[in-house]
Image (cartoon, grey):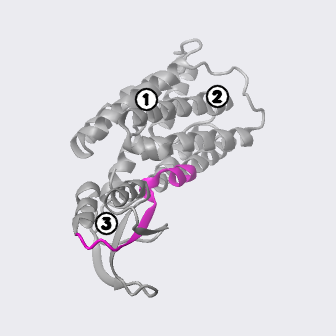
């Protein structure tokens, strides 16, 4: 389903909307009822919402103002995305950010936590939120906020989105420690770390892979198609089958995990009998751009 979505426009948008819904659900059902806080920009908006309610008495019954504050705070980051991350990404970003913010406002927050144990709420909410965010990022979208900077650094500096999230979340939870108490800060941090670690497991752009393609077709069309359609470089050399003694052409390409299905499809089109070996989790340095 996910591999299909990566190459089918309408399925991608279905997955993006589903991810936005799951993320809002995780926040409103497992985080807010426990008086815990997200990381990043949403966490800051939740802190502001709490301050407005407790210090100024500004609250709307049955509605979490953090979603509306989050949408407003995203405006400058949306401008950064428009200028530096591409117009195609910007369209998906707008879709996810607006739908997620609206859903956080509209989805009712339970008066009593669905799960009494705070640690269990953190784990369930973190897994659900991380899964949702990972799906969105893998399909080329984002929920906005500091994820935009995470995607920008992933593209320009090689950071993973989850690792960047852990860094800036430390600031948010330091504020929770100062404003509230250690319990809220610690459990909020646990929720955030679980979310960030799960994002990196699902977000396939962060997983580098190496593909070896062994083909008897000597036509350079295969390597040309791979380079044109994926934007990845291909190294080619000649070899010989040890059993048959036949000459073969060996292609080596380093790519992100989410591009593997695309390469397989290209190979299948040109040489259905080609032999493909894929190794995931390889370390790649040098001129290896992070594709969004």
| The quarter of the displayed image where residue 219 is located | bottom left
Mark 2 lies on a secondary structure that is helix
Numbered badge on residue 186: none
- Give the answer, above or below, for where 245 lies relative to 278: below
Q: CA distance from mark 2 to mark 3?
A: 40 Å
- First in sequence, mark 1 or 2: give its number: 2
User: Mark 1 Cα within 10 Å, few/some/many (few <14, many 20+)?
Assistant: many
| Residue placed under numbered mark 1 in the picture | 70
| 167 on left or right of 262 | right
* Residue under pointer 2: 29
Q: Residues within 10 Å of mark 3 (few under 14, many from 20)?
A: some
The magenta region covers: 197-219
For label 3, the residue is: 288
Q: Taking 6 as reference, is 287 left or right?
A: left
Q: Point out residue 61 in the picture as x, y percentages from the top left corner.
A: 58, 11
Kindly report the distance in space between the C-alpha atoms of the residues bearing marks 1 and 2: 18 Å
Q: Horizontal and vertical percent for residue 275? A: 43, 70
């Amino acid at each position: 389903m996910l591999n299909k979505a990566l190459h089918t426009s309408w399925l991608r948008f279905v997955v993006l909307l589903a991810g936005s819904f799951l993320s809002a659900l995780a926040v409103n059902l497992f985080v807010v009822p426990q008086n815990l806080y997200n990381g990043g920009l949403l966490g800051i908006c939740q802190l502001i919402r709490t301050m407005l309610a407790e210090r100024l008495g500004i609250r709307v019954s049955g509605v979490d103002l953090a979603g509306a504050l989050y949408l407003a705070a995203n405006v400058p980051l949306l401008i950064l995305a428009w200028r530096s991350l591409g117009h195609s990404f910007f369209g998906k970003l707008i879709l996810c950010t607006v739908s997620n913010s609206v859903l956080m406002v509209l989805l009712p927050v339970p008066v009593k936590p669905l799960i009494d144990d705070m640690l269990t709420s953190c784990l369930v909410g973190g897994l659900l939120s991380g899964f949702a965010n990972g799906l969105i990022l893998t399909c080329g979208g984002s929920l906005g906020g500091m994820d935009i900077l995470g995607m920008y650094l992933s593209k320009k500096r090689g950071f993973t989105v989850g690792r960047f999230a852990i860094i800036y979340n430390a600031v948010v939870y330091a504020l929770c420690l100062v404003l509230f108490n250690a319990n809220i800060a610690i459990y909020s941090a646990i929720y955030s770390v679980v979310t960030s670690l799960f994002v990196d497991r699902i977000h396939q752009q962060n997983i580098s892979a190496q593909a070896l393609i062994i083909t008897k077709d000597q036509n350079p069309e295969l390597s040309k198609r791979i380079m044109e359609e994926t934007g990845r470089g291909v190294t080619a050399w000649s070899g010989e089958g040890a059993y048959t003694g036949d000459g073969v052409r060996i292609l080596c390409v380093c790519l992100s995990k989410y591009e593997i299905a695309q390469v397989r499809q290209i190979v299948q089109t040109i040489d259905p009998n080609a032999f493909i070996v894929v190794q995931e989790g390889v370390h790649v340095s040098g001129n290896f751009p992070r594709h969004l």
